[in-house]
Image (cartoon, helix red, strand yellow):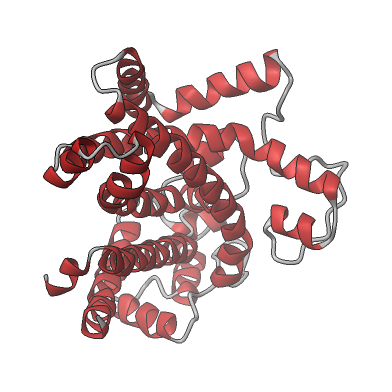
Amino acid sequence: MKRYIIRRILLVIPILLGVSFFSFILVRLIPGDPARIILGERATADQLERLREELGLNKPLLTQYVIFLFKALRGDLGRSIFTRESVFKEVMNRFPATIELSLFAIILASTVGILSGILAAVYQGSFIDTIVMVFALAGVSMPIFWLGLMLIWGGALLLGWFPPSGRLDVTIDLKTITNFYILDSILTGNFQGFINSIYHLILPGLALSTVPMATIARMTRSSMLEVLSQEYILSAKAKGLPKRRIIFRSALRNALIPVITVIGLEFGFLLGGAVMTETIFSWPGIGRLVYDAIMARDYPLVQGCILLSATVFVFINLVVDILYAFIDPRIRYD
């Protein structure tokens, strides 16, 4: 087991190097000149050249990458071109909002997806199975921007049950400690802040959880059907063991192995791919920060966001792989 974990950790290094290199190159391919955007159309050639030199944009691309890499290894991701703040600080200020939203979405998606997948498998071919599969197909097919707008229209404008945007009402006074609003409201005993934070999470959380919920439901159904047809399950049924015991004690543990992998991957995608949801709901997370940075051609900020998101994604997958090996020891010998 120790060798397996060491091997998996060592694999992280080339992956992160590849991510850093390609993100660096791709960011440079975005059309537009940051110096021109900062100084405006009336800037002279000398002014533009001086600013490019100051920002290091006049050096060869490979030199710029090597400088960026060595700084990143020391924990320095540079400074935002526009705000002149540390990129690491800017990203860390926004990351808790994205993690809070993604955690809410993945918990919702896993709970509903696994339960509906089990129901669909146990009652295969029934009305319940059909309903689950129809919703799963609709979930993976529905554009998030359309679903988000519908949720704002129905849940916020028509019914008035939930706020349409933001993380907290301006009337709520919440002392921030970790920048995770739910955790902060618990730590400070602010019950009103806790309820208000949950209310603000529901609409964007629903929008963000739809695709992973459908994927998890389909994967759980498929995996459960495969396990339920195994000989040891048929033998347990022949012995007259209670159906609930066969499903939850014998079948579910083996059926959840591939589902755990899917949940880990989906959580990683949520962390890095919540741009659309955060934009629609004005959620002040990493997705909106990336969007704003791309629009402003803020290279260091875009690179920092991509690199930190990719690092979190890779480490989530590392944890999933190790967890996978604990559940199914045969994986260790692959």
Above or below 85: residue 131:
above
Give how far across and how far down residue 258 sits, in percent: 25, 50
Measuring 28% from the left and 45% from the top, which residue is drawn there?
251
Viewer-nearest residue: 261 or 204: 261
Identify which residue is drawn at 30% across, 80% down: 63
Q: Which image quadrant: the C terminus?
A: bottom left
* Among the 4 quarters of the image, the one containing residue 140: top left
Q: Position of residue 9 (x, y in %)?
A: 29, 79
Give the vertical position of 62 relative to 267 (above or below).
below
Q: Is residue 37 visible?
A: yes
Q: Is residue 168 visible?
A: no
Residue 324 placement, left or right of 150: left
Between residues 205 and 322, which one lies in front from this camera angle? Answer: 322
* 196 vs 258: above or below: above
Tell me the quadrant of the picture where the N terminus can be found.
bottom left
> Residue, x 68% and y 22% (percent of image)?
156
Q: Nearer the viewer, residue 3 or 62?
A: 3
Q: Position of residue 243 (x, y in %)?
A: 33, 34
Along the horizontal axis of the image, is 22 left or right of 118?
left
* The one of 131 and 23 positioned closer to us in this rendering: 131
Q: Tell me the residue at 22%/40% (across/down).
A: 239
Q: Find residue 4 and report its horizontal and vertical position in percent.
A: 22, 79
